[in-house]
């Protein structure tokens, strides 16, 4: 039997790959509680990686898509609406499946795009890995959901604020930067917190349907399923994942709560929006 | 593969249906509100 310190050394960084710990994962009766604790805890770093990058990049894309969707020009609003419709209208599980099937079909050497004076080679090899391809799908997914939240917020901006901006002679980008965007963020922020939480929970789906876990380096839920397969006991691994994710969720709530306080700091106390926990169970 | 494709279309159809319903509801509720959407609807009615 391994001691706890030994399993920490052997498995905590194992999710990075075979070079960072034991070659093989613990098997069968050899599995100790500490193995499960540390391997699942180590796997959490991939959940954090997916969530942070997807939410961080998706935030800016979502702002753009939301602005496209509320624009009066149908050439902008129609594609944005279609994009949002597709990614909100299909389960993330199926999106992973189809995108992985598509990425596998791309030529491994890359795609050459002749531009006349030079040839651009688009690297496609990385897309079949979860760390790039899965992240790509997650970014598109969170972009669609966040964009719709931002659209709702853009429509709900108080008319008085916009008129005040006009009265002060603000227009174009200055008006957007100083009035529209802060108001949009303020109104959307409680729902956007939910989106961030839920996206973090959806990162457990990356390895479930399509993307392979090379060298058995996966995220927390991948290892939890592995342990359940090995020990036939779901009552240790799954509660461990749940506890880790509750902790992660609390961190997100605190962080986003601080931002929310800052976005609402100019309002009188009774008009401030508090963040409430409203999970979406089906996605 | 085909199973997933059918499932995808089914979910898209369901979303399309509910988006229409909620779109109508939100337009109905935005009417006359002192928000950007309310103002837009008012402009549309005037024009």
Image (cartoon, coloured by chain):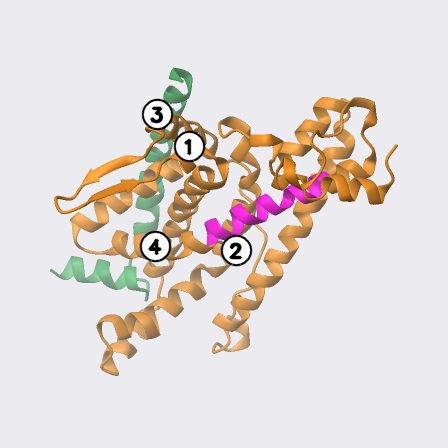
Judged by depth in the image, the label closer to the viewer, 1 or 3, is: 3
Numbered tag placed on residue A95 in the rendering: 1
Query: From the viewer's perspective, is A63 left or right of A202?
Result: left
A131 or B28: nearer the viewer: A131
> Within the magenta stretch, is there residue A123?
no
Please give the range of residues in magenta. Answer: A39-55
What secondary structure is found at the residue carrying circle 3? helix
Report x, y in % for residue A57. 42, 53
Q: Are marks 4 and 2 in contact (CB under 8 Å)?
A: no
Chain A representation colour: orange
Badge 4: residue crowd in 10 Å (few <14, some 14–19, many ≥20): many
Please report the residue visible at 30 percent of the width from the left and 51 percent of the height from the top: B27
Mark 3 — residue? A105
* Vertical relation: A127 (above or below) A275: above
Alpha carbon separation for disc pair 4 and 2:
16 Å
Does label 1 or label 3 sit earlier along the sequence? Answer: 1
Which numbered disc flags the more N-terminal residue, 1 or 2?
Answer: 1
């Amino acid at each position: 039997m391994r001691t706890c310190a030994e399993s920490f050394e052997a498995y905590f960084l194992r999710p990075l790959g075979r070079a960072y710990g034991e070659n093989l994962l613990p098997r069968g009766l050899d599995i100790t509680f500490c193995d499960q604790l540390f391997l699942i805890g180590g796997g959490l770093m991939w959940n954090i990686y997916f969530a942070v990058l997807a939410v961080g990049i998706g935030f800016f894309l979502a702002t753009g898509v939301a602005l496209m969707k509320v624009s009066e020009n149908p050439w902008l609003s129609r594609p944005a609406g279609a994009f949002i419709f597709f990614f909100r209208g299909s389960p993330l599980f199926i999106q992973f499946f189809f995108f992985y099937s598509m990425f596998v079909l791309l030529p491994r050497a890359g795609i050459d795009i002749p531009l006349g004076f030079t040839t651009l080679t688009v690297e496609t090899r990385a897309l079949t890995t979860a760390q790039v391809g899965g992240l790509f799908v997650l970014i598109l997914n969170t972009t669609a959901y966040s964009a719709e939240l931002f659209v709702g917020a853009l429509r709900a901006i108080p008319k008085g604020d916009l008129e005040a901006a006009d009265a002060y002679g603000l227009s174009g980008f200055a008006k957007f930067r100083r009035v529209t965007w802060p108001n949009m963020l303020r109104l959307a922020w409680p729902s956007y917190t939910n989106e961030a939480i839920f996206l973090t929970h959806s990162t457990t789906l990356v390895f479930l349907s399509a993307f392979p876990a090379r060298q058995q380096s996966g995220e927390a839920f991948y290892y939890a399923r592995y342990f359940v397969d090995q020990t036939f006991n779901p009552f240790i691994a799954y509660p461990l994942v749940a506890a880790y994710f509750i902790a992660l969720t609390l961190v997100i709530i605190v962080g986003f709560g601080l931002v929310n306080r800052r976005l609402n700091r100019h309002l009188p106390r009774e008009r401030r929006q508090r963040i409430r926990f409203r999970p979406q169970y089906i996605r | 593969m085909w199973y997933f494709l059918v499932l995808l279309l089914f979910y898209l159809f369901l979303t399309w249906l509910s988006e229409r319903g909620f779109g109508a509801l939100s337009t109905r509720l935005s009417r006359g509100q002192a928000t950007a959407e309310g103002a837009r609807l008012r402009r549309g009615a005037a024009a």
